Amino acid sequence: MNGIEIRAGVEEPEEKGRPSAALLFLEAGVFGILLLFGSLKGISFSEWVVYPLTALLCWAIWYTYFGSRRAYLLLVLGAVAAYGAVVFGMEDVFREQIRYIAGCILGGSKIEPVDVTETVLLMAALLAFFTAMLEFLIRSHRLLYFMTTGLLILAPLWGIRAGAGAALLLALFQAAFWILQTDGGAAWRASFEGVNKRRILEKSSFAAGIAVLAVFLAVLPLVSVNADRFYTWIYQGESQVYRTMNRLTGRDAAPVTGGTVGRGNQYRTGTPQLEVEVDLKPEETLYLRGFEGDEYLGGSWSEVGEGGLFEAVEEKLGWQMYSNGRFSASNLYSSMYFMMNTNVEAEEPPRWRNMKICHLNGEYENMYAPYYSQRGWGWGGDLYEGYLYWYYEQQDMNAAWDNVYEDFAVIRDWYRALQEAYMEEMRIAYTKVPVQLLPQLTTLCSENHQDSLEEVTAFILYTLHENAEYTMTPGWAPLNEDIVEYFLFDSGRGYCEHFAAAATLMYRLYGIPARYASGYMVQPSAFGLQESGSWKAVVTDREAHAWVEIFLEGYGWTPVEVTPAADGGSAAGFPGFDNSIFRKLVQAKGWDVEKPGPRSEEEERMELAWQPSEKFFDFDIDFEKYEELLYVLKVCGIYSLCLLPVFLDYRRLRRLKKLESMSSRRVFFRVLEMLRFAGIMPGYDGTEADFAAKLAETTGVPEADIARMQNLVSEAAYGEKVLPPEAENEVRKVYLSLAEAVYKRLRRHKRFGFRCWKAFF
């Protein structure tokens, strides 16, 4: 009857019956992976098609495998034939969709997602059969456990933010099947000798699932309400690991340089790296450039190499004969603006400054140079490891090229011709942008036309202020998204490398030559007076910085600070542009850039020492703010309702299996309880003389069987001997016959309660 056979005293084989828990956990694993995949940026599919069909397929696999292995084999063969026909008939569709999905995983996504329902359905079916094969047939959970764990760990690196729903389903899948597939050792088997082990394992797996759900529901609201504090704890631990590893490997003492735009958090150790000594205390922020970026490669910059550019310049000027000598275009250009400023005729000519730079780790593979400078020698006669520069501050630069000393006029003309030729060539080289990697940034600039360099600069600063905030711990960016687009249009959080890279590309999109630069930014306050009369600063990795440099006629490459200032305003300034001009343009354009500035390192360190706030315990929650949490809870609720029949079926089978261990007296009590529920023979308690005849007349079960059940139960209650297993089993068989007969007499609404809730049958 319904596949249930009562055999007293014999353990039920593990493969007998259909364990409802197996279907629940199979769907949890498949749906969890589908949720992760569906959250990949750029992926879109019809959920109302994929999820119901996947659930139906999981049910078919479960039903046939645990019901009829022959039917399961037919299902597998039918699926293989269907896959072959579908793939053959829709080859072009699948090829195009798979190519697009690979692009989303490896190289970013388009602005508008592409529908890939057909491929997702194929993937879901393969995943369902693969999971069922490992869990049901091979009974090996280890591979799927590590696979799902790897997906959860690596998901953020691909921009997958499915969040709580996928994590909960995969955690349930992992815990439950791990317990179900555990065989245990001799001690385990001895502990459960003579007990139906499958039932014990199913109970344990359900308990694990409930525990996972309880922990999840307890932790999720706390994490959602205090997400910033939660990530602060994580970043604090990450910071300690990062700093410890850097100190152990010696990397903390290596000077910072390079064109890689960071994709994660930045932690500074405060380790001294450079020693900078000047003869006059700086009055302006000192930028020491160690790297200049040429082409943007998507997350990094290639280093500037102007050999080919200067060859083109020499060819244009006819200077090929000097290409390898002292008067080559590259040699003349390297000190051109310093020399021009030195030879401008003025009543009080500006004085150049002397600088010594020493690398404290003793390595000089990469050199750092101030702007408007030339390599120097012989300052003070001090001979120690390091190198010298003569340089001007920006305020001391005088672009009056028509007012030079008479004996310098010929060289001035050379310089002027060199500058014009260089500007023509570099305009092509330093306005290149890989627009295919930056569709949103390209669209933004094309839709916001600006006329002058000042307006372009103001718009860039406005965009950065409006779309992003400064922090050293923005979290990890997905590997498959361009870091500049992700920073500016998705996360809205970043540090100097992100601001500088975005600004450089925006300048180029507006046709203004610009380069990404990195090195050190040293404030005048960092310099201290020495006994010798010079000023010295010890530069640590906290001063490592990135900025933009643009080309200005008469000045050459000039630094532009695009990272927000501490007061939230703009720190950008170059000849012809300062913060007051920026404010005027902002006001004229009607822009609003009043946003908090970057937090100081002290503020970020103070935030790590978290103290519970009163707001943490305030239950007056803004539900709009936690819309994602409500969505997750709603999805879990709908999913629970969909799985309710599975839970009820499992509960019914579990109760029926208890008949195996029930005594005949307890079984007879269930008979009376069943009759009362159905409204049959009210007032009878089973001791009446006409009980068997009346019940046989009502249900159609033979009177002799019912009378035999009465006698056996009476003997068990009042007899001196224990009933043998055969007699106990006979009582159970009569019970099942009565249950089936009563069930057929009930109305439809009563049948649900009789079968699913009371589990009489």
Image (tube, helix red, strand yellow):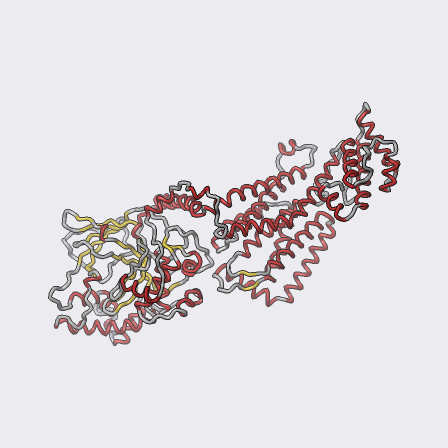
Q: Is residue 591 left or right of residue 190?
A: left
Residue 403 at least partly seen: yes
Q: Residue furthest left?
A: 347
Q: Residue at x 82, y 38 (%)?
A: 681
| Quadrant assignment for the C terminus | top right
Q: Is residue 110 left or right of residue 424?
A: right
Number of on-image labels? 0
Q: In the image, what residue occupies the spot 65% across and 37% down?
A: 200
**Residue 147 visible within the image:** no
Q: Nearer the viewer, residue 603 or 400?
A: 603
Quarter of the view holding residue 729: top right
* Residue 120, percent from left and from top: 59, 59
Image quadrant holding the N terminus, namely top right
- Is 523 situated above or below 423? above
Q: Position of residue 152 (x, y in %)?
A: 52, 49
Q: Name the spot of residue 521 as percent of width and height, x first.
A: 28, 55
97 relative to 704 in the view: left or right: left
Q: Is residue 617 above or below residue 356?
A: above
Position in image of residue 64 (x %, y %): 71, 50
Q: Quadrant of residue 586?
A: bottom left
Q: Nearer the viewer, residue 158 or 629?
A: 629
Q: Judge by depth and name the residue closer to the eye, 741 or 62.
A: 741
